[in-house]
């Protein structure tokens, strides 16, 4: 497996993919991102580069990766672990991280790759959110709009 993103979209062939990821993480760390978030970014990007296997990064490739996640592709780091199918929220997490990384890498200050948009997959397994009834809203509205009483 090659260690960088080859092809038409590489603007800095001297920088390897792991170096790009480390620079990306260092910049986000300097901007105050939480360690847990940075570790999530690292794992997602490591999984992506493993799956990428030396191919060019493009919108089509990212869409294929998201489909591979839906089809249950597993990274080597999960070999021997209990196998669970990913939910839509996890797949969205992968797409969100890739979107953030692509935006950063194609920023005029970085210019490591040519920019493209990462489409966020549709989530189908979201639970219905809690909602107040009209009567409950009326009660709250009445309390909020009542005259202030001095004690």
Image (cartoon, rainbow, N blue to C red):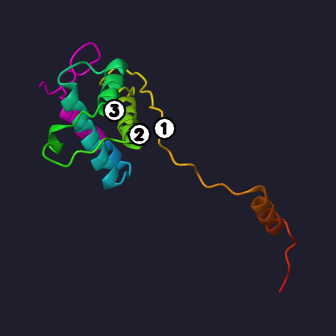
Q: Earlier in the sequence, mark 2 or mark 1?
A: 2
Indicate left or right for 109 with 120 as reference. Answer: left
Q: What's the distance in space between the residues labelled 2 and 1, CA to CA? A: 7 Å
Q: For residue 1, what is the image quadrant?
A: top left
Q: Tell me where the magenta segment starts and ends, as one range.
A: 1-25
Q: Earlier in the sequence, mark 2 or mark 3?
A: 3
Tag 2: Cα neighbours inside 10 Å, few (<14), some, or many (≥20)? Answer: some
Q: Say what secondary structure mark 3 lies in.
A: helix
Q: Residue furthest top?
A: 8
Of 44 and 91, the residue lying toward us? 91
Examine the rendering and report whether any part of residue 110 can be seen. no
Residue position marked by numbered label 1 in the rendering: 124
Residue at 18% across, 44% down: 78
Of 102 and 106, the residue lying toward us? 102
Q: Position of residue 95 (x, y in %)?
A: 38, 34
Of 56 and 47, the residue lying toward us? 47
Vertical placement of 35 versus 120: above or below? below
Residue at 27% across, 34% down: 72
User: Are the residues at dot 2 and dot 1 in contact (C-beta closer than 8 Å)?
Assistant: yes
Examine the rendering and report whether any part of residue 45 can be seen. yes
Tag 3: Cα neighbours inside 10 Å, few (<14), some, or many (≥20)? Answer: some
Residue position marked by numbered label 3 in the rendering: 70
Q: What's the distance in space between the residues labelled 2 and 3, CA to CA? A: 8 Å
- The C terminus - image quarter: bottom right
Tag 1: Cα neighbours inside 10 Å, few (<14), some, or many (≥20)? Answer: few
Indicate left or right for 124 with 41 as reference. Answer: right
Residue at 36% across, 29% down: 102
Of 10 and 128, the residue lying toward us? 128
Residue position marked by numbered label 2 in the rendering: 88
């Amino acid at each position: 497996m090659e260690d960088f993103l080859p092809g038409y979209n590489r603007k800095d062939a001297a920088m390897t993919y792991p170096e790009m990821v480390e620079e990306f993480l260092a910049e986000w760390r300097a901007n105050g991102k939480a360690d847990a978030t940075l570790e999530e970014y690292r794992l997602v990007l490591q999984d992506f580069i493993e799956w990428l296997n030396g191919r060019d990064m493009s919108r089509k490739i990212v869409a294929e990766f998201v489909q591979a996640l839906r089809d249950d592709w597993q990274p080597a780091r999960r070999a021997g672990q209990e196998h669970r199918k990913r939910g839509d929220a996890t797949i969205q997490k992968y797409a969100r991280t890739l979107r953030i990384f692509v935006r950063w890498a194609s920023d005029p200050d970085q210019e490591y790759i040519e920019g493209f948009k990462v489409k966020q997959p549709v989530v189908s397994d979201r639970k219905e959110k809690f909602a107040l009834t009209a009567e409950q809203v009326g009660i709250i509205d009445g309390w909020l709009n009542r005259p202030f009483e001095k004690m």
